[in-house]
Image (spheres, grey):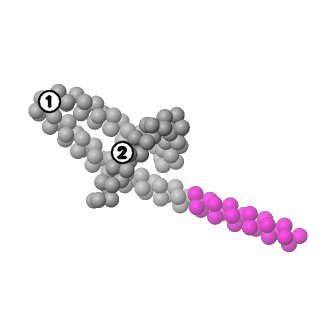
Amino acid sequence: MEQKEFIQQEKITGEDFSNRFKEKSEELAESGKSVFDTELNNLSEALHSAADKLHQKEDFMAQFGDKAVEKFDSLAGYIKEHNASELVKDVNEVSKRSPYIAIGGMFVAGLALSRFLKS
């Protein structure tokens, strides 16, 4: 009888630990997301500035700059509107469907992370 009680107690303790770990990891992911949001805003401002300079020079590349800024702003908005667990789920789905896009996304994320670490 004591063995069953011990097992039940350990099971509750394990579940409690699992729940606490999940809560802490979600909190950590959300705090990392807020830092990433700030960096996305900084990068967005830089892209807008670059596109404006292309327009001032009346460069034919301005239209490509505008499209890049538009896509980036769309991505930044999506990231801001979703929580970290939803983002991870979506990244997993995209990487399964399109591994090359996932690799490109990891490259861009690496560039953003290196920029963040340098500042």
Task: Give residue 52's position: percent from left, percent from top.
Answer: 17, 36
Label 2: which secondary element: helix
Which residue corresponds to the image point at 53% horizontal and 61% vertical from the top-left?
A: 24
Q: Taking 25 as reference, is 42 left or right?
A: left
Is residue 57 shown in magenta?
no
Task: Give residue 7's position: percent from left, percent from top.
Answer: 79, 66
In front: 115, or 71? 115
Toward which corner of the image does residue 81 lie, by quadrant? top left
Residue highlighted by disc 2: 108
Q: CA distance from mark 1 to mark 2?
A: 25 Å
Task: Give the amino acid type for the residue marked by disc 2 in the picture.
Answer: Val
Label 1: which secondary element: loop
Task: Give residue 39's position: percent from left, percent from top.
Answer: 32, 51
Which residue corresponds to the image point at 72% horizontal and 64% vertical from the top-left?
A: 12
Please report whichever mark, 1 or 2, sits nearer to the chain's N-terminal start: 1
Characterize the local packing of mark 2: few (<14), some (14-19) or many (20 or more) Cα atoms within 10 angstroms.
Answer: few
Task: Give residue 69's position: percent from left, percent from top.
Answer: 28, 36
Task: Give the amino acid type for the residue marked by disc 1 in the picture.
Answer: Asp
Q: Is residue 60 above or below residue 53?
A: above
Characterize the local packing of mark 1: few (<14), some (14-19) or many (20 or more) Cα atoms within 10 angstroms.
Answer: few
Which residue corresponds to the image point at 47% horizontal and 55% vertical from the top-left?
A: 29
The span picked out in magenta is 1-22
Quarter of the C terminus within the rendering: bottom left
Residue highlighted by disc 1: 59
Please indicate, yes or no, whether residue 38 appears anywhere in the rendered image.
Answer: no
Q: Taking 19 as reference, is 62 left or right?
A: left
